[in-house]
């Protein structure tokens, strides 16, 4: 018989190949080190509408890797350069940070099959979101962003009312629930919510992201339409 491979934790050993989706944060310098311009692009390797040198360099880089790429400006920015920033035919050094995009369908598919680590994908997804406010990792696989706070923290055993909007990150399920909760009472809330609300007792409104295991265990919740290995987002309001 065959045994399933152990779930891979990160993306060690992964290298971008044709059709993979990557994100580049880059800065362009003159050869003597003056910053010319900077930008960020997300593209499919060998297919997306970015300069040829991006595609070529991407295929020699992995996930969360920084590198320097030297190029004629024609290869990087075409015959016109970047008007007002990079003259045509100016050699450039690109300093890049490449990450595998969380929009990459092959990565997402491997997460949903349980082949690649869901918590690692979620960490990258949450950190790539352009949302104002501080992100807090409460425990592995649970991230919180507080949007507003009460004047004073909740007291243990205090009764509060929770409005919770739950959604899977693949948008396959969304629902709203309302419930009373005695602060600190265990087993009333899914573990991710219990941990997040206990660790941030002043939170009034917050967004909580978690792996499916930290909400509904390794089997998901079939009756709620939640399959395993699908991360979730909870929008929570704590009403006093």
Image (cartoon, rainbow, N blue to C red):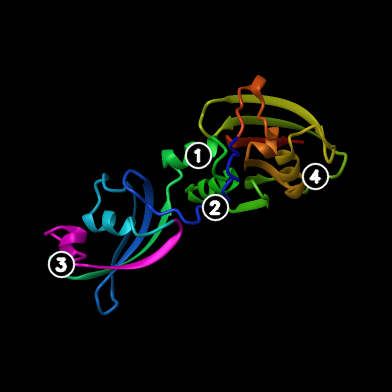
Residue of label 2: 10
Q: Residue furthest front?
A: 1
Q: What count of labels does the image hold?
A: 4
Q: Dot 3 lies on which element?
A: loop
Give the Cα distance between marks 1 and 3: 43 Å
Residue of label 1: 110
Give the Cα distance between marks 2 and 1: 12 Å
Give the Cα distance between marks 2 and 4: 37 Å
Relative side of 2 to 46, left or right: right
Give the Cα distance between marks 2 and 3: 40 Å
Along the line of sight, the residue nearer the viewer: 126 or 159: 126
Magenta segment includes 65: yes
- Disc ID at residue 154: 4
Q: Position of residue 197 (x, y in %)?
A: 74, 43
Foreground: disc 4 or disc 1: 1
Foreground: disc 2 or disc 4: 2
Q: Dot 2 lies on which element?
A: loop
Foreground: disc 1 or disc 3: 1
Q: Residues within 10 Å of mark 1 (few under 14, many from 20)?
A: some
Foreground: disc 2 or disc 3: 2
Name which of mark 2 and mark 3 comes first in the sequence. Answer: 2
Q: Position of residue 58 (x, y in %)?
A: 33, 56
Name which of mark 1 and mark 3 comes first in the sequence. Answer: 3
- Disc ID at residue 87: 3
Magenta segment includes 111: no
Magenta range: 63-87
Relative side of 153 to 216, left or right: right
Name which of mark 4 and mark 1 comes first in the sequence. Answer: 1
Q: From the image, which quarter does the N terminus lie in?
A: top right
């Amino acid at each position: 018989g065959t045994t399933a491979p152990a779930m891979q934790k990160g993306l060690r050993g992964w290298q971008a190949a044709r059709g993979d989706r990557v994100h580049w944060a880059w800065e362009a310098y003159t050869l003597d080190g003056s910053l010319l311009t900077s930008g960020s692009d997300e593209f499919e390797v060998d297919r997306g509408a970015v300069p040829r040198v991006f595609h070529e360099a991407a295929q020699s880089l992995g996930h969360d890797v920084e590198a320097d790429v030297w190029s004629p400006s024609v290869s990087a920015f075409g015959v016109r350069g970047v008007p007002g920033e990079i003259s045509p035919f100016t050699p450039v050094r690109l300093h890049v940070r490449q990450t595998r995009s969380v929009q990459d369908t092959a990565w997402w598919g491997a997460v949903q099959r349980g082949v690649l680590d869901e918590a690692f994908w979620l960490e990258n997804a949450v950190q790539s979101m352009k949302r104002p406010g501080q992100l807090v990792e409460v425990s592995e696989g649970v991230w919180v962003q507080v949007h507003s706070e009460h004047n004073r923290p909740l007291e243990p055993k205090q009764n509060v009312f929770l409005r919770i909007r739950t959604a899977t990150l693949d948008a396959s399920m969304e629902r709203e629930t309302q419930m009373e909760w005695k602060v600190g009472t265990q087993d009333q809330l899914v573990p991710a919510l219990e941990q997040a609300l206990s660790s941030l007792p002043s939170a009034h409104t917050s967004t909580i992201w978690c792996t499916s295991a930290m909400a509904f265990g390794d089997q998901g919740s079939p009756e709620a339409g939640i399959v395993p290995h699908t991360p979730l987002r909870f929008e929570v309001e704590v009403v006093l």
